[in-house]
Amino acid sequence: MTRSNLLRHEWIGLRVEVVRSADPGLTGRGGVVVDETQKMLVLEEEGRVVKIPKALCVLRFTLPNGEKVEVDGRKTVMRPEERIKIYERHRAER
């Protein structure tokens, strides 16, 4: 998994932090992704489950190699399987 293909991969198990949000209470929240739905990321944060609305946030993922990548959550408001298909299709069209 790299910066260029993050949107084409499964996110469960990745560490993520909210770096900016329309809801100030979400900024700084973070944890490990345990589930993803069309509109939400579900994180485990210090033993608690936290739901983060993707449309309100800019997210910083930590990849397995330690690299940090920021993603505008608005671009990911779709079912995870659709996100993977769409971004894979965009790559193939280049």
Image (cartoon, rainbow, N blue to C red):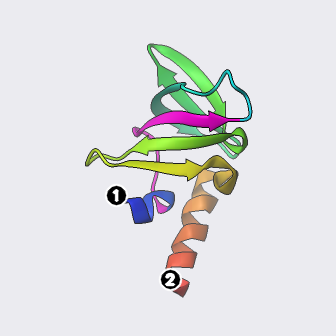
- Specify few, some or many for label 2: CA neighbours under 10 Å numbering under 14, 14-19, or 20 or more: few
* Residue located 57% across and 77% down the image: 90
Label 2 residue SS: helix
**Residue 57: where, in percent of width, then height?**
65, 40
Q: Amino acid at mark 2?
A: Ala
* Residue located 55% across and 51% down the image: 71
What's the magenta region? Answer: 8-21
Q: Is residue 46 part of the magenta span, yes or no?
A: no
* Residue located 44% across and 43% down the image: 61
* Residue located 59% across and 22% down the image: 50
Q: Give left or right: position of 54 versus 68.
A: right
| Disc sitting over residue 74 in the figure | none
Q: Is residue 41 above or below residue 67?
A: above
First reached walking from the N terminus: tag 1 or tag 2: 1
Quadrant location of residue 23? top right
Residue that badge 1 annotates = 1
**Residue 86: where, in percent of width, then height?**
61, 69
Label 1 residue SS: loop
Q: Is residue 10 part of the magenta span, yes or no?
A: yes
Q: How many marks?
A: 2
Quadrant location of residue 47? top left
| Outermost residue toward the bottom in this view | 94
| Outermost residue toward the top in this view | 47
**Residue 46: where, in percent of width, then height?**
44, 14
Nearer to us in this view, 25 or 38: 25
Residue that badge 2 annotates = 92
